[in-house]
Every structure is written in structure tokens, then in C-alpha cells.
Image (cartoon, grey):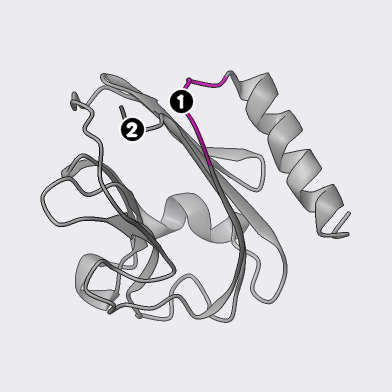
């Protein structure tokens, strides 16, 4: 069973609205899990994929004010089928998306690029963590604070 929580600690070298397509993480073709910051053609939205289902496409206007260029950011996606939430730097950017998905067990996890090796992340991917349980908003806030403390960014 694929984990239900994805946590990324990263320092982007790019603005959220720069028009580039960047992959935080990806898995095998056919059962893709991950987060992609989409390019100009997709209005710089952030896409969340669970088992090849696009759970949400988060509009640039929703997350841009939380995005910190050249500094540590923490993105948390907590999902079970029919309920997905996401936070960027302790601001909720997706609330209770009800898209259904089923879990699978991908054989590979690619960090900072797609499974084909393209759309590489520009900046530093400091950590990627996964959990097999859904988290409450208080657990997410605690995790984000701990991630920032570990990177000495608070």
C-alpha cells in the first residue's frame, strides 16, 4: 500500500510563476504518485497525483504567496481516497478534495525528476518523507516546524 502522506522539504531556485515544469517526486509509469509544479501551459499550477489520478490541480494564486525562493519550504500532502489536504509552509492550500483513488505499490520513487528523468527540480530537495497514515492539521503543523528546525530556518 502506498503511503498516504508525502512531505517535501526543499529550497527552490525559481519563482512559483516562472513558467517551468518541475517534479518534486514521481513513481513508475502506470501507478504514479507525486507532486509536480506545472509550467506556463498549465498556468503554473501544482498537481498532486495518487496512483496516476490527478487528485488536485492547485492554482498558482492559491499557493504563490506561501512560496519562498531561495529559502526552506515544507510541503505536506495528506491523503486517503476521497479526502486529500495539502499545506505549504503551514498554510493549507488544499482542503478536503474528495477525488477517489486506489492505492498501489510502485517499485521506484524518483526524487527531483519524473520517472523518465525529465522535468528536474531546480534548487535543493532537502528531504522527502512518507507515512502510511493520514495526519491531522496539528500533526502537519508539528512536522513542518520540526523540518524547519532541522534545517535551521527558524
Report the number of discs.
Answer: 2
Sequence-wise, which precedes: disc 2 or disc 1? 2
Q: Residue at x 48, y 20 (%)?
A: 134
Is residue 9 visible from the viewing direction of this image? no
Q: What residue lies at 19% left-to-right and 27% top-to-bottom?
A: 101
Query: Residue 127 lies in what quarter of the image?
Result: bottom right
Residue 125 sits above or below residue 144 on the image: below
Residue 115 image position (x, y, % from top left): 25, 66
- Between marks 2 and 1, how big is the CA–CA gap? 7 Å
**In the shown orientation, is residue 148 left or right of residue 70?**
right
Farthest-out residue, front: 107
Residue 31 percent coordinates (x, y): 17, 45
Secondary structure at badge 2 equals: loop
Q: Residue 132 magenta-drawn?
A: yes
Reply yes or no: does residue 151 show up in magenta.
Answer: no
Position of residue 60 relative to residue 93, above or below, is: below
Q: Quadrant of residue 84?
A: top left
Q: Is residue 11 left or right of residue 149?
A: left
Mark seen at residue 81: none
At label 1, counting other C-alpha atoms closer than 10 Å, the crowd grade (few under 14, some 14-19, many 20 or more) is some
In which quadrant is the N terminus drawn? top left
- Up-down: is 121 above or below 30? below
Q: Which residues are magenta?
A: 130-135
**69 in relation to 107, above or below:** below
Residue under numbered circle 1:
132
Q: Which residue is mark 2?
A: 2
The residue lying toward the viewer, choosing from 63 and 125, is 125
Left or right: 6 with respect to 9? left
* Residue 142 figure quarter: top right
Dot 2 alpha-carbon crowd within 10 angstroms: few under 14, some 14 to 19, many 20 or more: some
Which secondary structure is most common in the magenta stretch? loop
Q: Is residue 95 left or right of residue 33?
A: right
Amino acid at each position: 500500500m502506498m503511503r498516504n502522506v508525502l512531505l517535501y522539504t526543499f529550497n527552490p531556485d525559481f519563482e512559483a510563476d516562472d513558467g517551468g515544469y518541475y517534479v518534486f517526486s514521481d513513481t513508475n509509469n502506470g501507478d504514479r504518485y507525486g507532486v509536480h509544479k506545472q509550467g506556463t501551459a498549465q498556468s503554473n499550477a501544482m498537481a498532486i497525483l495518487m496512483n496516476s489520478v490527478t487528485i488536485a490541480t492547485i492554482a498558482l494564486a492559491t499557493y504563490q504567496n506561501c512560496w519562498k525562493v531561495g529559502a526552506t519550504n515544507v510541503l505536506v500532502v495528506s491523503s486517503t481516497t476521497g479526502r486529500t489536504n495539502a499545506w505549504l509552509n503551514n498554510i493549507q492550500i488544499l482542503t478536503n478534495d474528495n477525488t477517489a483513488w486506489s492505492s498501489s505499490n510502485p517499485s521506484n520513487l524518483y526524487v527531483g525528476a519524473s520517472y523518465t528523468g525529465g522535468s528536474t527540480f531546480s534548487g535543493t530537495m532537502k528531504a522527502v518523507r512518507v507515512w502510511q497514515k493520514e495526519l491531522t492539521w496539528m500533526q502537519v503543523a508539528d512536522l513542518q516546524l520540526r523540518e524547519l528546525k532541522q534545517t535551521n530556518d527558524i
